[in-house]
Image (cartoon, rainbow, N blue to C red):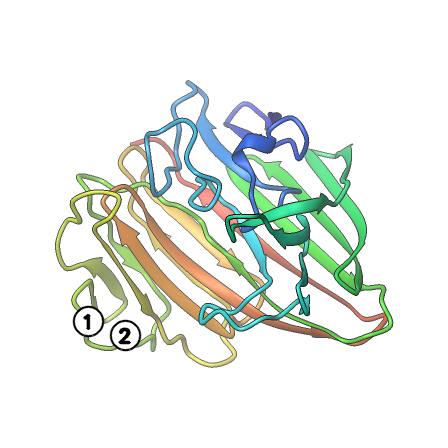
Amino acid sequence: MLRVSNAQLQVDLLDPVRDRSLLGPRFCWGGYIWQVSDHEGSPLLTGPEWPKFDPTPFNGQGLPESFRHRTREGNPLTWQGDRGVALGIGELSHNGKGELEVSNPCVWEIDLVAEGIRFRTQHSAGGYRYEIDREVTLEGRRLHSRSRLRNRGESPLALQWFAHPFFALTDRLIEVEVPAGSTLPDNPGFTLRGTALRPKRPFNDEKDGHLDCLALPPTTSLTVTLTHPTLAFVRFFTDFAPDECFVWANGNTFSIEPYRMLALAPGETQAWALRYEFGPMK
């Protein structure tokens, strides 16, 4: 793995080549934050299969991000016939069992930058041509993830991007302070009272959980504060107003997932950023 560290925190990122067994067709390979640890080496993030050290690539762990090649309903986005592309991953095809596999991975250039690592790829597949820059930097107890996507092809590029951070639970529970004015439909998994979002009960295991849509105030960037078993708090920020936002948990982790609906004309570039703040030890 690749590592960024300072006197406060240690950040491990997956190497797009050497850590191929942990990667698949769901999460972007470049800039995949696998774990953040405190100065004693104790992990601060989890995942759906936690504490399994080699979770399935679909589930993953840490702070992955994804350029969706299909909608949640299964409708194709970056597909032309039987050829598809998962941006930041590679060309997609189906094997003899009908399973999705990466048949032509993109190649990432990796460079050290001040306080972090930069990942860059230019890739052509499935009738699309694009460029992605991903930069992960660590500043004290703040972790920054910055992305830039350019459509280098001759056709419009329309897709969805989302972050899927996996936060740690305390006795299988968590409390999340969400933006004022957020709403949540009545559901069996979570309660929202004022700005306090909580699971209605501890989920039992990996297969016991709930997903729901959190409606945020319009034109408002996302800022949430989460409880943590060993830290005073964790905060998560976006520099954009999400088009959608989902909350999900099982017995091992909690995630809040901001979405962006991206539509890039030929030659167009879009950029955005995430920030995580890891509070002091309790």
- The location of residue 259, given as percent across then percent down, is 51, 66
Circles 1 and 2 in contact, beta carbons < 8 Å: yes
Height in image: 230 above or below 39? Answer: below
- The location of residue 118, given as percent across then percent down, is 73, 40
Q: Is residue 270 left or right of residue 236?
A: right
Q: Residues within 10 Å of mark 2 (few under 14, many from 20)?
A: some
Q: Which mark is residue 187?
A: 1
Please tell me which residue is depicted at 47% across the width and 65% down the height of the picture: 222
Height in image: 163 above or below 55? Answer: below
Q: Is residue 156 left or right of residue 200?
A: right
Q: Secondary structure at mark 2?
A: loop
Q: Is residue 167 left or right of residue 24?
A: left
Q: Quadrant of the image for the N terminus?
A: top right
Please tell me which residue is depicted at 46% across the width and 21% down the height of the picture: 39
Q: Which mark is residue 63?
A: none
At label 1, which amino acid type do we have?
Answer: Asn
Name the residue furthest top: 40
Residue 114 in view, yes or no = yes
Q: Where does label 2 land, which residue?
A: 184
Q: Quadrant of the image for the C terminus?
A: top left
Q: Is residue 74 left or right of residue 132?
A: left
At label 2, which amino acid type do we have?
Answer: Leu
Name the residue furthest left: 201
Mark 1 vs mark 2, CA separation in Å:
8 Å
Q: Secondary structure at mark 1?
A: loop
- The location of residue 207, given as percent across then percent down, is 24, 48
- The location of residue 184, given as percent across then percent down, is 27, 74
Q: Nearer the viewer, residue 158 or 70?
A: 70
Residue 13 in view, yes or no = no
Nearer the observer: mark 1 or 2; the answer is 1
- Residue 139, quarter of picture: top right
